[in-house]
Structures are given as structure tokens and as C-alpha cells.
Image: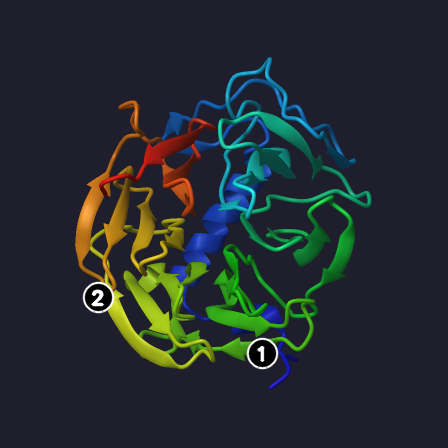
Amino acid sequence: MIIRATARRMLPASAALGLLLAAAAASSGCRKTETTGGARASASPSPTVPADLSPHLSEKPGSSAPPFAGLRFPRGIAVDGRGRVWVADFGNAAVRLFDAAGGLFGGWGGHGEGTWAMKDPCGIAVRGNSVYVADTWRSGVERFTDAGQFQAKLAADLYGAHGIAAAANGIVYVADTGNNRIIVCNADLTGPKAIGKSGAGPEQFASPVAVAVGPSGDVYVTDTGNRRIQVLDASGKFKTSWKFAGWGANAEAYVDTDADGSLFVSDPVAGAVVMLDRKGVERRRWTADGEGKKFARPTGVAVDRKNRILFVANTDSGAISRVPLDGK
């Protein structure tokens, strides 16, 4: 069924409303500072992406700045086939591209109303030469080339879309957070269809924040308002759900999958990233990176399956953590 619903009429769940009100409040104030629990959140030094910057990507990453420098309140992250790390730079309203060590290739975006402007992007996914961005509070979901050239926009009435995933077969999944549903579309963002509605039953959601596709084609959704992970098949049909012992109100919990089907799930409230096996059982928990530095509200997670590194976006500190996965 092609989507023709009016987005704001589809926001009945109090959990979804709470999340989006919190996000909207953060959006209006985060360009100066973002707060959590009354404490001022630290961030990286001054932004390096000015307002409305057209794509600028270098052949080689910069080496003079600290690793992953310049980010402000990062959310979603993704690793491409070359091992490069893409970041949805929420506070700078931009897309950033780094090498695995944190050297900056460049990016595009920025505040404003121009061609490349964004507003609080929360999600990013990469498949081949395509980059998908959830421009959460402005344009919805857009597709770019990996050189930053605009390709398409998703024609669906989204409300506060956060996570996005691109499957190996080209299908794209979007967590339409405020509308309590998942959007499924083609690689070129055509033919959108909706899965689910507000509720606590199978294929029902309350503030779904992130989505990931496993090697089997199964789809995993962080159904945060229901404090569970829903597992769907590739067509969007419900398979099972796993209760998650964590999160709390308005948690921006992200998820990624490993080659063996295990999951990595962020728990921003607990300051942790959890590994679940293929049955949803917790097998390991991290609260710090490979050098022992504590996470600071971890949100986005991305696995470099080839080089065995887990990347974690620390929203409060602006840092991207690296966690070695050898012998996990």
C-alpha cells in the first residue's frame, strides 16, 4: 500500500510524543549546548562545517586534528565497504566522513535553508555508492552519492524519522519514529510502504528509533517505548520480539548487526553498548572503549565486520569510540 497518510495524525502514542517533544526541545537549543539530566554536555571544538556547505571530500584524510574532531552531538553512524566511517553530525546539521582512525575526509550540510542545509540529522546508512540520510527535522530521508550529490527524496509523510538501514538487496528501511511505524522502500526511495502502527502488539511500535538488517535479511527495530527489539522478516512480517533490560524514557537507542547475526545495541541511559546473540540473549556489555574511556550517552553504533571494530557515537562528548571486537 502506497503511503498517503497525514503524518501528524498518526502520532497517538504518549511514548512517541514524549520522545519527539524531547527531540524538538533539544533541536531548538542544541546549537549552543545540549543538556542531559540538568548537566551541561561537553562537545568537540568549534564546528568545521559552516552553514550550508556543498560537498567537499578530500582524497586523503586530514592528519592535523584529533581523531573525529569537530563533531557536535553525533547520532547515527555507518561503515562503508572501504572501512570509512560516516556520521550524522546532529549538532552541526551535517554529514561527515572519516577514515577508521578518525581522519576527516570532509562532508556536506550545515544550518540554514540552502541546497545542502540540514536540520538535526539523526540517521545514516551506506550501501555501495549510495548514502542515505535521515534529515530528521527538515527534509526527511534523502539519498546521495558517496561524493555528496543529491539523488532522491523519500516521498512519505515522516515525523521525526531517526534510524535508517539499507539491505544487501537494495531495500531501504526507515524508523518513522513519531508515526510509530517502519517505512520500506526501494533503493531509489520509490514505492514507500508502511509497516505497523502505534501499540504494543506484533508489528506495533512505540517510538521506534533505529533499524538494522542482519545477514539473513531479518530486520531489527529498537522499539524503545515498548522496551523491546522487534524482529521482522525481509517483507516486514513479525517473527519475534525480545525484551530489553534498559533504555528508559525517550532513549535514542541504535542497533547494528555483525556477520554472525549477533546484535550491538546502545543503551544511552546506562552509558553502555550491549551485544545480543541471535536469540536476543545478552552476551557482553561495554561501558568504555578499547582504551578504557567511558562512553558518554552512547547512541549510534556501527560494526566494521572486516576489521573487527565497533564504532560508538558518544552524543554528550562528541567523540566516536573504537571498541576492538577480536575475541568478543
Q: Residues within 10 Å of mark 2 (few under 14, many from 20)?
A: few
Mark 2 is on which residue type?
A: Lys
Mark 1 is on which residue type?
A: Lys
User: In x, y percent, where is residue 4?
Assistant: 66, 80
Image marks 2 and 1: residues in contact by CB distance under 8 Å? no
The residue at 61%/36% (across/down) is: 97
The residue at 69%/47% (across/down) is: 146
Residue position marked by numbered label 1 in the rendering: 193
User: In x, y percent, where is residue 249?
Assistant: 32, 51
Side of 204 relative to 158 (left or right): left
Which residue ends up furthest to the right in the rendered image?
114
Side of 187 relative to 328 (left or right): right
Compared with 15, 106 (above or below) is above
Compared with 319, 8 (above or below) is below
Residue position marked by numbered label 2 in the rendering: 279
Q: Distance between the Cα atoms at labels 2 and 1? A: 28 Å
Number of the label disc, if any, that sits on residue 136: none
Query: From the viewer's perspective, is the residue at label 2 or at label 1 nearer?
Result: 2
Color encoding of the figure: rainbow
Looking at the rendered structure, the secondary structure element under dot 1 is strand
Count the numbered circles shown.
2
Q: Nearer the viewer, residue 277 or 238?
A: 277
Compared with 1, 279 (above or below) is above
Q: For the C terminus, give its image quadrant.
A: top left
Location of residue 19 (image quadrant): bottom left
